[in-house]
Image (tube, rainbow, N blue to C red):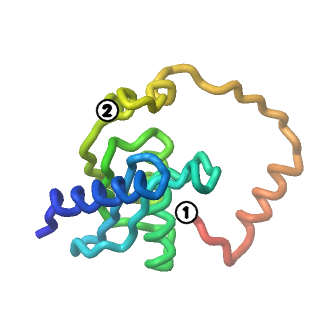
Amino acid sequence: MIDHEKNLRKAIELSKQSIDSGSSPFGCVIVDAEGKIVGEGHNRVAPDNDPTAHGEIVAIRNACRNLGTFDLSGCILYTSCEPCPMCLNACKWANIAEVYFAADRFDAENIGFRDRVFYDDDPLELHRINLREAAEIMREWKDKPDRIEY
């Protein structure tokens, strides 16, 4: 049986390591269906100058490298704080169906993180310029017999 609290405590441990290394307090662990840790990470936004390097994203990248696949079906993600929409969608792209977290988005907001803006209904301005060659390249990929779908 998988020990959810133990895995969540490991994620919290990684969040402490994150602040000790000069980053923010977010850590994450990913386990396989048997409960074995297959990936872990903590926030690297500031040290890497990468706004996508949230603990969950770092852990997903680590798990994918370790397992040699982009499909983490059957894996469970544990994170010290409720995942932001970007990280939740990364879980969906990786086929992670189960997420456990300790602190929530309001805890993050209370220490200065601006998560609320990502939950508001204030979308970015999107502008489509319909260039034919973009669709042609997509069709070219679709026609490749060796394409890898995800």
Q: Amino acid at mark 2?
A: Asp
Q: Looking at the image, which residue is at 41% across and 59% down?
A: 95
Q: Looking at the image, which residue is at 35% across and 53% down?
A: 15
Within the image, what quadrant is residue 33 found in?
A: bottom left
Q: Amino acid at mark 1?
A: Tyr
Q: Nearer the viewer, residue 76 or 93?
A: 76
Q: Which residue is mark 2?
A: 107
Residue 9 drawn at (x, y percent): 22, 58
Q: Looking at the image, which residue is at 56% across and 20% down?
A: 122
Q: Is residue 119 left or right of residue 134?
A: left
**Secondary structure of residue under mark 2:** helix
Q: Which mark is residue 8?
A: none
Image quadrant occupied by the N terminus: bottom left
CA gap between label 1 and label 2 equals: 34 Å
Which one is in front in this view, the residue at disc 1 or the one at disc 2? 2
Residue 148 drawn at (x, y percent): 61, 71
Q: Which residue is mark 1?
A: 150
Q: Is residue 20 left or right of residue 140?
A: left
Bin the neighbour count of mark 2 within 10 Å (Cα to Cα): few under 14, some 14-19, many 20 and up: few
Q: Earlier in the sequence, mark 1 or mark 2?
A: 2
